[in-house]
Amino acid sequence: MIDSAAFISFLEKNFQFICGVPCTYFKKMLIFLAEHKSELQLQHILATREDEAMGIASGVVFSGKQAIVYMQNSGLGNVGDALTSLAQLYKLPMVLLISYRGLESDRSFPEHDIMGEVNEAVLKAFNVPYWILSESGWESEMNLALKEMKNSSSPVALLVKDGVLSE
Amino acid sequence: MKGFEVITAMKDYISEKDIIISSNGNISREVYHHLPQPQVYLRGSMGLPVAVGLGLALANPNNRVIVVTGDGNFLMGMGSSVTASFYKPKNLKILILDNKSYFTTGGQQTVSPALNYSKFIDSLNAEYKNSKEASKDQIKEDLSRFLNSNTFAMLHLIIEASKENLENIPWHPENITKEFTGKISKLS
């Protein structure tokens, strides 16, 4: 598992805002955010839907600041218009941290099966470049994602599998 | 009153430092043509103007951020008004222009009449809240109190369903971003 303190410290250096809808896969990271709220230079904004989170992040990016949006991959089904008619259309760079549900460890949760199967195809169809976050190479994967985000001035995604950001 | 008449009446209260987010369709066109430029003119993103406005308000605490949205857009993203009210940024003002229809797409009716806006806005505890029919003799006072309130504010105005024949916004969204971020960088 990636150390929550190290991960949040990395986010703090690259973003002023973090916004999203939770997934169990982010539990540790979200607990860390809540517990260290007062000393962090990273403003955490709750959202009711994933496209709303992208809307809030877009407002932040329109202001010349940086935002990262977290969501479960079920929420990927909710953000199609926020991607194509807002963040991509207006060239608003942001990182989407998406939990990769529906793989082997989720066999008792059939609600994730279908999105799990098409998750990467959906990102490809929307032309969102993505990286799969690994425990050993997460910093270089995040740096690659950030570099692409800046070059394209558009959203990029990081997929988070079970056990990577929470036990 | 008609929507563009309300938007035109806002002009007297808007300064260069203000940030406006307009919802897609006629409202964005009217804001583009009648109010100081540049602003965040949404072209798609149906349901998201309040969310975008919240992001702008939180990232620019020293500037007034005004969301101008129609009822169709507002209803699609209704959860965002709850999120906005959770944070209650003092600089965020949400104006809902309610013609009870999706006017840009041909005037199809919305479900807006089912919502008691007065009670809904009241339940969000906005410090400034008002829900009424827009009227020519009161619009100046209503807009002035709404826009000059030093608090999270929501104003719901029932308007006549009608539109002006305005040209499409000539800027590509990429240019909207370029113009707007240019303005923001000068403000800070």
Image: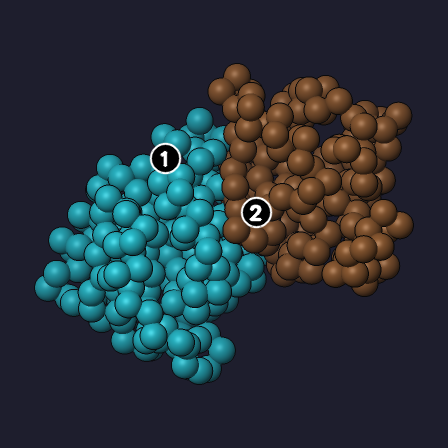
Residue B157 appears left or right of B27: left
Q: Considering depth in this image, is B171 or A129 the residue closer to the camera?
A: A129
Q: Mark 2 falls within which chain?
A: A
- Labels 1 and 2 positioned on one and the same chain: no
Give how far across and how far down residue A94 sits, in percent. Answer: 66, 40
Give the labeled residue for mark 1.
B63
Q: Mark 1 falls within which chain?
A: B
What color does chain A have in the rendering?
A: brown
Identify the element where label 2 is drawn: helix
Give the labeled residue for mark 2.
A53
Q: Crowding at label 1, few (<14), some or many (≥20) Cα neighbours within 10 Å?
A: many
Identify the element where label 1 is drawn: loop
Q: Which quadrant, please, contains the N terminus of chain B?
A: bottom left
Residue at the location (42% across, 30% down)? B187
What kind of residue is marked 1?
A: Asn
Colour-to-chain, cyan: B
Q: Considering depth in this image, is A47 or A11 the residue closer to the camera?
A: A47
Give how far across and how far down residue A41 sits, in percent. Answer: 55, 21
Instruction: Check the image and tell me how it is coloured.
Output: by chain
Q: Would residue B98 be seen by someone viewing this image from the given angle? A: yes
